[in-house]
Amino acid sequence: MRLFILFFGISTLAFAQAAAPATAAPSTPVEFNIPAGTKVPLALKHAISTKTTHEGDAVYAETTFPIVANGRVLIPAGTYVQGRISHIQRAGHIKGRAEVLMHFTTLIYPSGYTVMLPGSVENAPGVDKTSVKDQEGTIRGDSQTGEKAGTVATAAGTGAVVGGLSRGGKGALVGAGIGGAVGTAIALLSRGNDVKLDAGTTVEMVIQREVPLDASRLPPPVK
């Protein structure tokens, strides 16, 4: 009898173990990647100016067009982008152009999903009289050498006319000299133009390094 009970107990335990569902292994999140070199169009949410903005100030922007790869939206339109001003300088009186360098550091998806990234300015089509001068994405104001030379020439010409009317030929030479000196003083005392990016200005961000994404936090596949 005892042998039967022992056999029955072992059989029951073996059946229970066989019938118990296997414990599922924890699933690993599926990853997508934003490739290095991906270009993302942005619109600034606030103004930036070499006259009033300072190094270390925050930068806020928003994506204006979705970035899609392999049927998945990697970065939807309306994603917030945060960054910092890394370098800023005003134009000099004699030489030196105005410059703004910003780096983007964070993507904040509409769902709240947050991703760290390295991003810089690739192009600034919405900023007049500027160019992007290096791989870091420094936005630099155009040279005003020609404009300042024009100020000197205009002042000299005006002085010559006034001097000529008052003193004849010799007066014209004196007047030109005085006018030229005034024009030079004006050119030296005035700074070059500031770089100004108004709210809504469009810039193009480039992703500098591959950025992994959690597929479960992304928008559903594009149908």
Image: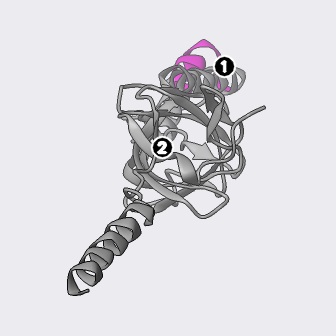
Residue 27 placed where, x, y %? 42, 53
Magenta residues, dominant SS class: helix
Q: Residues within 10 Å of mark 1 (few under 14, many from 20)?
A: some
Residue 82 placed where, x, y %? 51, 56
Label 1: element kind: helix
Q: Which residue is mark 1?
A: 164
**Which residue lies at the image location 61% right of the left edge and 52% below the top edge?**
61
Q: In terms of image quadrants, where is residue 57?
A: bottom left
Q: Residue furthest top?
A: 169
Residue 42 placed where, x, y %? 63, 41
**Which residue lies at the image location 72% right of the left edge and 22% below the top edge?**
165
Q: Is residue 216 left or right of residue 198?
A: left
**Which residue lies at the image location 55% right of the left edge and 60% below the top edge?**
113
Q: Residue furthest bottom?
A: 2
The foreground one among 20 and 120 is: 20
Q: Quadrant of the C terminus?
A: top right
Amino acid under disc 2 = Arg
Q: Is 172 included in the stretch rendered in magenta?
A: yes
Q: Which of the two discs, 2 and 1, labels the residue nearer the N terminus?
A: 1
Label 2: element kind: loop
In the image, residue 1 sits, relative to residue 80, either above or below, namely: below
Q: Quadrant of the N terminus?
A: bottom left
Q: Is residue 38 left or right of residue 79?
A: left
Q: Residues within 10 Å of mark 2 (few under 14, many from 20)?
A: some
Q: Residue furthest left?
A: 3
Amino acid under disc 1 = Gly
Q: Which residue is mark 2?
A: 191
The segment highlighted magenta reads 166-176
